[in-house]
Amino acid sequence: MDSRKDEQERGITMKSSSIALLYTIGKEEFLVNLIDSPGHVDFSLEVSTAVRLCDGAIVVVDVVEGVCPQTRVALRQAWLENIVPVLVLNKIDRLILEMKLSPLDAYVHLTQVLEQVNAVVAQLFTTEVLGKSASDSSSVTIGGLYDWTTGLEDIDDSNIYFSPEKGNVVFASAIDGWGFSLHDFASLYAKKLEISEDELLNCLWGDFYLHGKTRKLMPGAQEKAKKPIFVQFVLENIWSLYDTIIVRKDKERLQKICESLNVKLTTRDLRHTDGKVQLQAVCSQWLPLSSAILDMVCTKLPSPSHLSQEKAEKLMCSHTQRFDTLPVPTQALRSAFMDCNSSKEAPLIVFVSKMFPVERKNLPENQARPLTAEEIAQRREQARNRHAQKSLAEVDSEGMRPLSDIEAQQTKNKEGTEDIKVEDAKPGGQESEDVFMAFARVYSGTLKVGEDVFVLGPKHNPQTALEKEENKEEVDPSLTLKDLKPGQHLTRARIGQLYIIMGRELMPVTEAPAGNVIGISGLEEHILKSATLSSTVACPAFTELLVSAAPILRVAVEPAHPQDMPALVNGLKLLNQADACVQVFVQETGEHVLATAGEVHLDRCINDLRERYAKVEISVSEPIVPFRETVVEPPTVDMVNEAIIEQSSASRKEVGANEDGSVVITTANKQCTVKIKAAPLPTEVTQLLEENSELLRAMDHSLAAGTLSGRTIETIKLLRKRLEDAWNKKSIDSVWSLGPRRCGPNVLLNCVAGYNHTSIWDPTPPSEVISSESDSRSEHESSFVNGFQMATLAGPLCEEPMMGVCFEILEWSVKASPVSSDVTQPFGPFSGQLMSAVKEGCRKAFQAQPQRLMAAMYKCSIQANAEVLGRMYAVLGRRQGRVLHGDMTEGSASFTIEAVLPVVESFNFAAEIRKQTSGLASPQLVFSHWEVIDIDPFWRPNTEEELLHFGEKADSGNRARQYMDAVRRRKGLPVERKIVEFAEKQRTLSKNK
């Protein structure tokens, strides 16, 4: 399935790829669409594209490493997408050969790993139930007391956990080719022990043992120091097989084992010197891995026709909508989702999760294939005709007989039927080497080649489309993605070829019924990354994919030769369409920026640009790491020494602020005065605003369009209540705007006495006007808010966005004299003056408080042996990392360390830590949070102790200053530095003779 060269070299999966498998159980046949998704954290969005198309998931866990961060992410994505997971406990061979565990110790270790996985599932279940009960107003009793018993006790959770006796767990060693479920051994031993298969299946896993005399299954194996049945009947047999083949290499005993298991080995396998080859030959016949997993998939995972109502509604409704608020024709499509109907009457519904490139030469129609008998006969006939025409032409040239008109026309027709070379058909002599395929699943109806469908963008509104359809406004079939205007999210397209995806191979088909995963060509002009295809405009656009890791690593790219810029721009467009995890945009400075999820992902994108899409030399900048700017509480005498307080007071005087930190600013024409004060937001409020940024953005767009749905209102009310609990009701009621982009983690508070502002929670204008002065101010409210948005988008430290800052507007006065918006005024229109004044006032109020940088932080999970812990901690210390906790993994000598590491210090971290620990420590980095760097960027040593400790220049002390200056240099902003330290003339060493 790993068809890329870099996948094979690194030994990791980088993209989701699909294959269709036909499997038979008894007389029943199953078609299994299996999608292999990456496990590396840099490609987690590829997992999201695969999860959206599936009804079930196979979660593979390494029994030695246990539950890793990416395992938690995969389980969370499966839970949120309402798909059923099954578990594969892999690499059991490492327990035997590496960790040297006994069968009983291995059983205890397996139970602990299974408990870890179930603990993650239980946490997801508890979070969902408590979240629903918190949003339910009925959870509060009449007396006003919260009902703490609501939720968990009333819901049955017995069917959500992994349990071997239920058949949703497979024990495996993929490298040795074996795997089994409890059902395999239960059917084997039931006849020998003369016990019913169901009874043995229920007791084969757990604290049960076999009584020696009565031959009955009894509980309490641990209490009576007995071997559990799973150890006695299952693990000891597998351990014995490994001991015979790998450790002792006893070929005589191996032959006896093969006879008892009814396994046939060839002479070549018996003579082979590598024990692994013999082990794979035995196990692949005794306990085939493919059969164990496919049996579990076919019996435990639901089919496409068993789509739950909850999942259907979640696909159709975003988190800001409720199902009953959708148009009636849209609600009627739910039954088509759930029935998975492929009849002609069923509406066509297809979801495209991503676009992936395929080389044109690898398409089935462009590959060489054996000729049929009819084609061979046709080519022979064409060869005879060409030979005959050639002979006639030779005779005619000698003047013996001229060609008749009929013969000339036949000759022309014959020549016209000759094959045209592909090179001659290329537009402009060149054709792209890649064809973009849509990776899609048919949810309803039957998709056919050449069929016309509607392509619904992620922001398609069925209500608006139905109204246009009633007004007989047809969709222009010639529209493509680049022709769409703002607000348009609907085009028409014709389906090209359909393919069944078989790993790296494609199998052409003419139609695809509901329930199949399919590849579609001919949609590259209509789909950028994902879209919904349907035969009706009433179909809603599927909800957006869940993103577990945002692209945080950015680089600026440019061609080595300026004339190659068009090729680079075109290559970036192709890369943006081909890679679901990447983001490409142009900054205000004109730089073409590539945003990726990590270093491995960045390497892959740069290689694709150079070798596949742009095919030019590319210069890559140093990684662009984002920062945030914030303020903290002013220092007090109890907290620090007087020198820092004096330094803070000096910074306030420098920006012209008052003693309380407020700033008074006036417009250029002196007609408006504003008094602003900055303060830090409570940490909980900042986190809530950051986590709900998508909801706040949807709320702002809905308010602007006047389409606020009932579900959005309920969600906003819940968010507002949580904000009031974290802050206070008065402050929340006074929130004027959020920034930047009206959905960020900064707040503009209206503390102006007598002014009734337009609240973000209630879009209706104030019903009562306090005074005429309020009327004049309300006319300029949008300009005031825009100035705040501009200030929070680029802070004064290094033009990075602000975070966690509250700007209180204490006073705002506008003179009663008429204000003209004429551009010919000396200072320009008043709206522009007000925006500039508010922006400058916010920046000065920010500078009047203690300023801090906020760094993006990775959560770093490291598994290492005890002997390399010291070297691993040294690498973390050099890179400003901080260890949160470290625990020894039970049953092994390895430690699991959780740490946080600044993103700016993380480059080449994995390579350095592997080098320093000789490969015994392997880190996983996932973006976690933003953290304040608790160092003043403008701090300088003042006291004697500080001068003695840091020196006069404090070169190594101020890490925040180094980060700030680096960002300012990259953006071309002025940096305070001394070019010439000492200006005295140097002593001339050589003497003139």
Image (cartoon, helix red, strand yellow):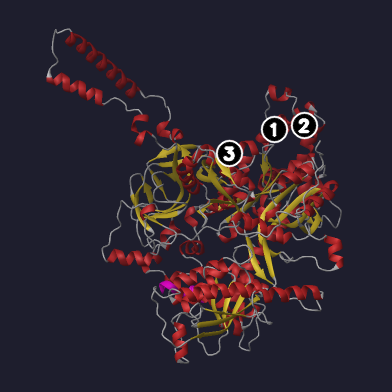
**Residue 29 percent across, percent down from the top left:** 50, 43
Q: Is residue 583 left or right of residue 463?
A: right
Most extreme residue toward the front is 993
User: Which disc is residue 245 wearing?
Assistant: 2
Are discs 1 and 3 less than 8 Å apart at CB? no
- Earlier-in-chain disc, 3 versus 2: 3
* C-alpha gap between disc 3 and disc 2: 31 Å
Q: Is residue 730 left or right of residue 399?
A: right
**Above/below status of 822 relative to 810:** above
**Residue 360 percent across, percent down from the top left:** 44, 35
**Residue 140 percent across, percent down from the top left:** 61, 83
Are discs 1 and 2 less than 8 Å apart at CB? yes
Q: Confirm whether the magenta stretch covers residue 540.
A: no
Q: Nearer the viewer, residue 695 or 336?
A: 695
> At numbered mark 3, what does the secondary structure look like: helix, strand or loop?
loop
The 10 Å Cα crowd at callout 1, few under 14, some 14 to 19, many 20 or more, is many
Find disc 1 in the rendering and name its residue.
282
Q: Amino acid at mark 2?
A: Ile
